[in-house]
Image (cartoon, rainbow, N blue to C red):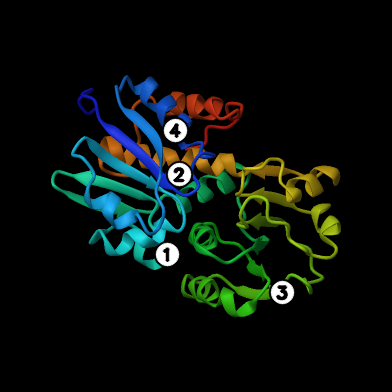
Amino acid sequence: MPSTASKRFEVWGAPIAHSKSPELHRAAYDVLGLEWEYRAVEVSTEQLADAFHTLPSAVGGLSLTMPLKEGILNLVSDHRGPVDLLHAANTVVRADDDWWLENTDWWGAAQVLSDYGGVSGDTVWMLGAGATARAVVYALSTLNPAKLVLVVRSPERARVTEVLAETLGIPVEVAVMSDIPSEPPKWVISTLPGGVVAEIPGLDVVAGSSTLFDIAYDPWPSTLASIWHSAGAPVISGLEMLVYQALAQIRAFVNADTSLSLEREPEIIDAMRLSVGLEPPSHPGV
């Protein structure tokens, strides 16, 4: 365990007031007995470089939202895990007088999907193809789906994510939202921003035969979640992924290693879940 000396950590983005990260981190710090501060700070893309280069020494790490996850890459040279492959980092960790980057979004997604039975041998549809989608693709590469269908408005914008899936060995197709495949999926994963409405004909039919994992959590329930709820189908909130990606960040802040478990980790997970209104899991999770 690290020293209980006071440190400060921050989540940056614009807008950032909706972020649940402060609740999650503070809940974990309380369990660990750490007198650490964690706060949300409004930082835009234009402000990122100046804000980062003038950080006081008391700040031990950052959590980042888009598009800062991409903007940070040129400001820190030490890139760990799949940061370069995904071209995004959501975690910045101070190491003495230097910094390193990590991406914990993919691990959060993988843990959630595993908790709910996994996707091995299943057809998965993914709505959207941006930075979050790339993290989910990397998660899927560890879980052996039968096929991934990228459901997007523009096939051209999906090309980077499609190539990533191919590189990772995932059978992948691209479909436009106005002309979805007739074969229903077992899973639908939405990486669309909160409040965005996916104009997909026949989505209520798809909902009746699949589980929705909607990575957005604000506002909630999302339009998609309401469609699945109406169909009586399972829905997983993005808060589930948020808990796990934050857990990996806290591992980095405490242990300097996202793969090294924390002391009292099951208790920490329960406290984090309760802090954002989720019930403790009925399964062990990590």
Q: Residue 245, how many percent across, how many down?
A: 45, 44
Answer with the quarter of the image where residue 282 lies.
top right
Using a 10 Å C-alpha cutoff, classify the residue at mark 4 as few (fewer than 14 neighbours), some (14 to 19) or many (20 or more).
Answer: some
Q: Nearer the viewer, mark 2 or mark 4?
A: 4
Cα separation between marks 1 and 2: 15 Å
Cα separation between marks 4 and 3: 37 Å
**Vertical comparison of 29 with 206: above or below:** above
| Residue 178 makes an appearance in the image | yes
**Vertical comparison of 45 with 261: above or below:** below
Give amino acid for label 2: Gln
The answer to which of marks 2 and 4 sits earlier in the sequence is 4
In this rendering, would 258 be left or right of 77?
A: right
Q: Which mark is residue 22?
A: 4
Give amino acid for label 4: Pro
Q: Which mark is residue 180?
A: none
The answer to which of marks 1 and 4 sits earlier in the sequence is 4
Q: Residue 72, how many percent across, how many down?
A: 33, 58
Answer with the quarter of the image where residue 57 lies.
top left
Asked if disc 1 and disc 2 are in contact, CB closer than 8 Å, the reply is no
Q: Residue 250, how many percent across, how many down?
A: 36, 37
The answer to which of marks 4 and 3 sits earlier in the sequence is 4
- Identify the secondary structure beneath mark 1: helix
Residue at which label 2 appears: 245
**Vertical comparison of 121 with 246: above or below:** below
The answer to which of marks 3 and 2 sits earlier in the sequence is 3
| Residue depicted at 24% across the width and 25% down the height | 6
Q: Which mark is residue 176?
A: 3
The answer to which of marks 1 and 2 sits earlier in the sequence is 1
Q: Nearer the viewer, mark 1 or mark 4?
A: 4
Residue at which label 1 appears: 86
Asked if disc 2 and disc 4 are in contact, CB closer than 8 Å, the reply is no
Residue closer to the observer: 62 or 110: 62
